[in-house]
Amino acid sequence: MRSSLFRAIKTLNNSASCSHLLRRGYGSEAVPDRKVAVLGAAGGIGQPLALLMKLNPLVSSLALYDIANTPGVAADVSHINTRSEVKGYVGEEELGKALEGSDVVIIPAGVPRKPGMTRDDLFNINAGIVKGLCEAIAKYCPNALVNMISNPVNSTVPIASEVFKKAGTYDEKRLFGVTTLDVVRAKTFYAGKAEVPVAEVNVPVVGGHAGITILPLFSQATPKANLADEEIQALTKRTQDGGTEVVEAKAGKGSATLSMAYAGAIFADACLKGLNGVPDVVECSFVQSSVTELPFFASKVRLGKNGVEEIIGLGPLSDYEKEGLEKLKPELLASIEKGIKFANN
Ligand SMILES: NC(=O)c1ccc[n+]([C@@H]2O[C@H](COP(=O)([O-])OP(=O)(O)OC[C@H]3O[C@@H](n4cnc5c(N)ncnc54)[C@H](O)[C@@H]3O)[C@@H](O)[C@H]2O)c1
Ligand SMILES: O=C(O)C[C@H](O)C(=O)O
């Protein structure tokens, strides 16, 4: 998936590769127009994500919205000679125009962590931001696929679902918590430890997106490697603490932005491919789910023309993973319930 996106970007202006792109659903004649809106587009994630979405040949219209600074970001990105037309929107009065006609809405709006904070510490500010943005989505583009990046994802996704329910627009197939960065990290860390080519690595990551709720399934990682139990445990912990590793390294200047923009671009690209009917598009995401008794859960999801086409089960787990799954459930449920309660108050 990752390599196919960037191969397509590289070959976008190369007519010699046109038949290859058309076959894969990348050529502009073969794919429909798609509008993508980024909410929080002037932020640490928003800016590089805007760049990556501008490079995506599946996008015909790119709407960049923020409460400040979007005209500059939009003017800058708009000079790149790729397919999409870019428009910047600033301030709440322009939010409706930014959203109208969107096929995919990506939300990285909200405050990031500082050292010593948990993602849940962001709830008080970000819950309100997400609620307001989702009310506007329900009004202006109720059929869009929503890619929620704002933390705490374990709560912001349930908030979005309740806002959409209240507006009468909720479709559980169209709401996604973006957990792709956990998968990106798990792949990178596994490749390093197992000494296998990173481009070939696949690792499902299930559960949620905070601390122990992030459960990488290294027993299912490919290519297979004979790692010791202690090595698997260390890889699991590093994946769970990946966000904190970056927050501490940035020392008060925010959290992951560049790797998140990359992960967000991968996930949005998968959504667009699904909408365009490309078969077998599978990514992990935090969605409404019956894979466990929890109402929302991240697992592998097949994406299609209506969003979630199939939620793929967990598959066989090691004893260590089974234990991790039971341990994460109370925390994940509490975060989900906190979001639901907030949205209904
Ligand atoms: N899901 C993940 O894996 C993941 C990874 C990294 C960061 N995050 C989260 O993404 C969020 C953004 O992180 P960042 O580093 O880009 O932060 P940032 O502060 O650099 O940028 C946030 C942007 O949101 C904008 N914003 C605030 N309120 C808004 C509103 N009502 N409407 C539109 N825009 C608004 C701000 O003006 C700012 O430009 C944080 O909550 C962070 O925790 C999630
Ligand atoms: O750790 C954070 O606060 C940001 C994000 O959720 C991440 O995983 O990098």
Image: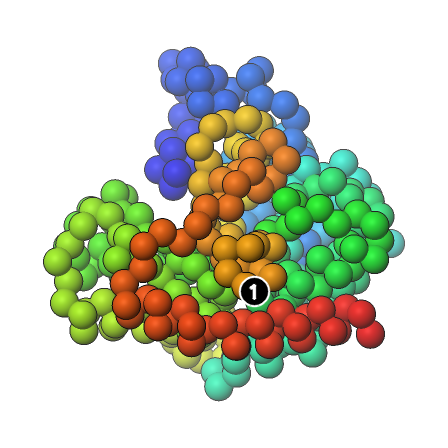
The quadrant in which the C terminus is found is bottom right
Q: Label 1 belongs to which residue? A: 294
- Specify the quadrant of the image occupied by residue 108: bottom right
Of residues 283 and 312, the one drawn nearer to the viewer in this rendering: 312
How many numbered markers are drawn? 1
Q: Is mark 1 on a helix, strand or loop?
A: loop
For the point 65% across and 31% down, the residue is 34
Looking at the image, residue 165 sits to the left or right of residue 244; the answer is right
For residue 257, say whether it is visible.
no
Q: Position of residue 182 (x, y in %)?
A: 41, 60
Q: Quadrant of the N terminus?
A: top left
Closest to the observer, 8 or 212:
212
Against 81, residue 102 (above or below) is below
**Position of residue 232 measured from the top left corner of the image (x, y, whole percent):** 23, 67
Front residue (pair 263, 60)? 263
Q: In this view, does 4 lie to the left or right of 190?
A: right
Q: Position of residue 223 (x, y in %)?
A: 20, 47
Dot 1 alpha-carbon crowd within 10 angstroms: few under 14, some 14 to 19, many 20 or more: some
Name, please, the residue furthest toward the bottom: 116
Q: Look at the picture and state if 15 lies above or below 303.
A: above
Identify the residue at image location x=77%, y=54%: 164
In front: 199, or 205?
Answer: 205
Residue drawn 52% across and 77% down? 330
Residue drawn where x is 55% and y is 26% of the image: 277
| In this picture, residue 212 sits left or right of residue 151 | left
